[in-house]
Image (cartoon, rainbow, N blue to C red):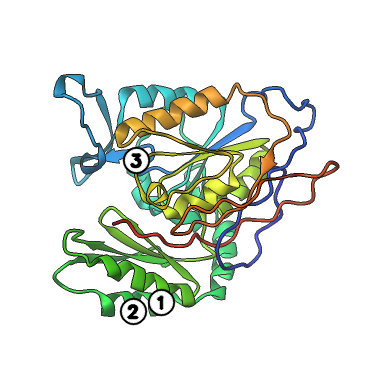
C-alpha cells in the first residue's frame, strides 16, 4: 500500500524500492478490491503508452494491423500513436483511477500529446523536475527539486563533457531540458557501442545517470526521479495503492515504487532483464504492448489487496533478485521518499 510519504529530502545514489505496506487502507479490509478512485496509475508515455511510427513494430500482415489513433502532432505532422483499443482502455482506466502521466518530456513537449479520456489533474514531466497540477507547473515542487539538485555536479559540467566526447559523424543535435538535464540525438547506426557505457561511468562519479532511448542519450541527475514526484501525488491525492508502467532505465525507480508494475518486452528494462516480485513482464512489443499494459491494469483493478512480500532491487547488467522477506505485523513505519536513478544498462 502507499501511505502518505514524507516531504522530499535531498538524496543521491541508486534508487531502491520503498517499502510496500501490508495494512489495508483506512475503512477497507485487506483482501477486498479498493474503492473506485483509490488507485493511482502512473505511466511512462513514449514506448509505453504512445509510439512513434518507427517504434510501432507492426510485424503482422497489413490486413491484420490494428487501427491507430494519432495522439500527437509536431510541426503539422503526425508523430505519436496508440491503438484505438488502447485509447478506449485508457479512457476507461482514467475514469476509475487517478491517472498520472509520468514522462521525461518537458512540459511543452507533454502538452503536444492529446491523450484520450479525461484530462489528468496531475502529470509528472522532465523526469520528475515538474509536477503539473491542472496543467500548471507547481512552484513549490520546482523549488524542492532545485534544492535537491545541489547534491550532484552542475548541469553545465555534464553537458560540456558530453559535447567534448561526442563525434560530429553521429551527433545530430543536443538539447537541455528546462535547465534540468541534457540529452543528445544521435545516429544509432554510427554510435559506438562503448560510448554510452563510458559516459555512464564518468557521469556516475558526478551523481548523474545515463539512459539510451531510441536515438536519444539522456544524462539525468540522480535526485531527479519520476518516483519522487509520483510519491508527492500519492500524498496529495490520498490514494491507497499505485500501479506503474515503463520501458526505460529512467522508469526503473517508478516501477520499484509501485505496488504492481508492468513492463513491455522492448526497451532498456527488457534488455537489462529486470525482475521484481510485483513486476508483470509482458510478452508484447511495440504499440500492442501499450494496449497490453492498459488491459492488464484494468484487470488488476478488481484484484483484492492484502499482505504481500516485498523486495528491493537495483537494475544491473545481470538479473539479481534479492531474497523476498515478509513484512512484520503492526503499524507500518513512515515510507521514505524514493531518491536516485537506476544504474545504466545501454541498449545494444
Snapshot quadrant of residue 35: top right
Mark 3 highlights which residue? 113
In this view, the residue in front, 285 or 98, is 285
* Disc number for residue 202: 1
Mark 3: few/some/many CA within 10 Å (<14, 14-19, 20+): some
Q: Please identify the quadrant where the N terminus is shown.
A: top right
Name the residue that disc number 2 marks: 161
Can the viewer see residue 125 in this picture? Answer: no
Number of other residues with Cα within 10 Å of mark 1, as a class: few under 14, some 14 to 19, many 20 or more: some
329 and 160: which is toward the camera: 329
How far across and down, in percent of the image, does residue 329 sit?
A: 84, 41
Determine the residue positioned at 78% across, 25% down: 29
Residue placed furthest toward the right: 330
- In this rendering, is residue 14 above or below 253? below
Side of 324 relative to 103 (left or right): right
Q: Is residue 141 above or below residue 166?
A: above
Coordinates of residue 38 in the picture (x, y in percent): 65, 30
Q: Disc 3 on helix, strand or loop? A: loop
Q: Secondary structure at mark 1?
A: helix
Cβ–Cβ under 8 Å for marks 2 and 1: yes
Residue 83's x, y, as percent? 30, 27
Amino acid at each position: 500500500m502507499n501511505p502518505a510519504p514524507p516531504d522530499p529530502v535531498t538524496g543521491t545514489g541508486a534508487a531502491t524500492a520503498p517499502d510496500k505496506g501490508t495494512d489495508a487502507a483506512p475503512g477497507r479490509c485487506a483482501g477486498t478490491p479498493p474503492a473506485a478512485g483509490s488507485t493511482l496509475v502512473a505511466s511512462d508515455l513514449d514506448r509505453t503508452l504512445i509510439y512513434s511510427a518507427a517504434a510501432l513494430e507492426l510485424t503482422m500482415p497489413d490486413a491484420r494491423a490494428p487501427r491507430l489513433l494519432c495522439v500527437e502532432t509536431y510541426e503539422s505532422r503526425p508523430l505519436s500513436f496508440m491503438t484505438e483499443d488502447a485509447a478506449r482502455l485508457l479512457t476507461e482506466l482514467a475514469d476509475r483511477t487517478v491517472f498520472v502521466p509520468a514522462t521525461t518530456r518537458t512540459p511543452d513537449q507533454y502538452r503536444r500529446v492529446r491523450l484520450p479520456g479525461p484530462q489528468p489533474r496531475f502529470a509528472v514531466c522532465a523526469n520528475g523536475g515538474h509536477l503539473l497540477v491542472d496543467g500548471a507547473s507547481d512552484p513549490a515542487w520546482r523549488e524542492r527539486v532545485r534544492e535537491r539538485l545541489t547534491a550532484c555536479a552542475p548541469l553545465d559540467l555534464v553537458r560540456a563533457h558530453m559535447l567534448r566526447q561526442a563525434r560530429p559523424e553521429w551527433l545530430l543535435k543536443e538539447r537541455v531540458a528546462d535547465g534540468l538535464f541534457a540529452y543528445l540525438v544521435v545516429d544509432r547506426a554510427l554510435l559506438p557501442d562503448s560510448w554510452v557505457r563510458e559516459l555512464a561511468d564518468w557521469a556516475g562519479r558526478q551523481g548523474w545517470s545515463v539512459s539510451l532511448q531510441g536515438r536519444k542519450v539522456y544524462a539525468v541527475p540522480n535526485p531527479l526521479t519520476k518516483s519522487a514526484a509520483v510519491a508527492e501525488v500519492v500524498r496529495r491525492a490520498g490514494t491507497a495503492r499505485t500501479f506503474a508502467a515503463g520501458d526505460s532505465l529512467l522508469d526503473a525507480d517508478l516501477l520499484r515504487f509501485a505496488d504492481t508494475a508492468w513492463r513491455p518486452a522492448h526497451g532498456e528494462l527488457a534488455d537489462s532483464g529486470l525482475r521484481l516480485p510485483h513486476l508483470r513482464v509482458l510478452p508484447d512489443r511495440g504499440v500492442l504492448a501499450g494496449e497490453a499494459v492498459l488491459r492488464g491494469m484494468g484487470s488488476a483493478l478488481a484484484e483484492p489487496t492484502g499482505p504481500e512480500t516485498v523486495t528491493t532491487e537495483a537494475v544491473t547488467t545481470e538479473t539479481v533478485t534479492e531474497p523476498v522477506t515478509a513484512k512484520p505485523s503492526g503499524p507500518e513505519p513512515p515510507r521514505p521518499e524514493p531518491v536516485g536513478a537506476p544504474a545504466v544498462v545501454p541498449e545494444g
